Structures are given as C-alpha cells and as structure tokens.
Amino acid sequence: MTNSWLAAYFRETVEIAQQIDLDAIDSIVTRLVRLRSERGRLFLCGVGGSAGNCSHAVNDFRKLALIDASTPVDNVSELTARTNDDGWDRVFSDWLKVARPTSRDVLFILSVGGGNRERNVSPNVVSVVDAAKTCGMDVLGIVGPEGGYTKDHGDIVVVIPTVNPKNITPHTEAFQAVLLHGIVCDPRLMA
C-alpha cells in the first residue's frame, strides 16, 4: 500500500509540471543562446538548496552548453570571508563586482523566496539583482510562488506554481533542477 503523503506529493508534482510557463522557459533558452554567441558569462546565485542547484547548474552549463558559468557558493572560503567582513546582504553583489560584468553577461537567480529586503528574505539576492541591473545585465530566475524581488525586477523569471502551501520549498527547489536540465539540454544550447 502506497504511503498517502508520498502519493499526494507526487500528485502535486504532476500538477506543477502541467502549469509551468513553457514560454518563459523558451525565452530563457533564447537569452542563453544569445549569451553564448556574444561570449557572455553566466553568474548564478542562490541560498540553501538553491545554492546546491546553482553549483550543479554551473557544471552543466560549462560542460554541456559550453557557457562560461560561475557561482559564489562554490568558493566557501571567499563566501565566508565576505560574509564575515562585509555582511550576508552584500556577499553576492560584492562577489559579482570582482567579475566586472557587462551587458553581455547574465545573472541567474535560483530562490524559493526571490528576495525581500523588508522581510529579511535573502537580502543578498536583492543586492545582487540591483548590482546586475546597474551593470546593464539581464536577470533570469526560477523562483517560488511569491517571486519576491527577483520576479519584480528580473527580465525573464519562471515562478513555480503553488499547489500545496506546505510544500513550496521542496517543490520549488526540485523544479529548479528539472527546469535547469530542460534548459541546458535544449538542442539550441546542448553542445
């Protein structure tokens, strides 16, 4: 007999998959194709499980799509030094400044909350989005249902639909990985 919680969780997963905004995903692929043709760089930022997805995405974009990609979460020494010396809210934006990004480059945010400075939800995401926009960069995102600052200030942002408010985080982080694999394996990007 199947566990009822698991059965419900996977029914929710199917519902979310059926509601995903495929046009937004297609627009992300199109923007990344342009990024690669212009020899731009892809910077990925996120915290918690989304940070793990950023790290995984860097591997896939570099290896499978031949896109120069990086994330600050892959360098724990720099990440913790910046957090200690400059504060958590500036850890991503200060990291990005070192790269001297231009309008050819793209920031990709993976976040459940999308950032909200007033509610102290990923203020580091808010700061890095602002830093990217100052440099003329496009901001892409895969975020949870509220979307936060990323949704409000990003250029192409996929919002993971809510079908059960109790499972927002696991579904959002799981679908980040699903969508990223769909993006990087799209024949227009796959090298």
Image (spheres, rainbow, N blue to C red):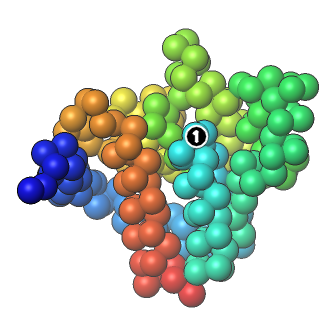
- In the image, residue 93 sits, relative to residue 7, either above or below, namely above
Residue at image position (21%, 35%) is: 164
Locate residue 102, reporting x and y percent: 75, 53
Residue at image position (42%, 78%) is: 186
Along the horizontal axis of the image, is 182 left or right of 3? right
Residue at image position (33%, 36%) is: 168
- In the image, residue 168 sits, relative to residue 122, either above or below, namely below
Amino acid bearing label 1:
Gly
Determine the residue located farthest toward the front in the rendered image.
1
Locate residue 162, reporting x and y percent: 25, 38
Quarter of the figure with the N terminus: bottom left
Q: The residue tagged with tag 1: helix, strand or loop?
A: loop
Locate residue 188, reporting x and y percent: 46, 81
Provide the residue designation for mark 1: 48
Along the horizontal axis of the image, is 137 left or right of 151? right
Q: Choose top left, top right, bottom left or bottom right for residue 163.
A: top left
- In the image, residue 152 sits, relative to residue 188, either above or below, namely above
Q: Choose top left, top right, bottom left or bottom right for residue 67.
A: bottom right
Along the horizontal axis of the image, is 147 left or right of 5? right
Residue at image position (81%, 51%) is: 75
Q: Choose top left, top right, bottom left or bottom right for residue 34.
A: bottom right
7, 160: nearer the viewer: 7
Query: Is residue 14 in view?
Result: yes
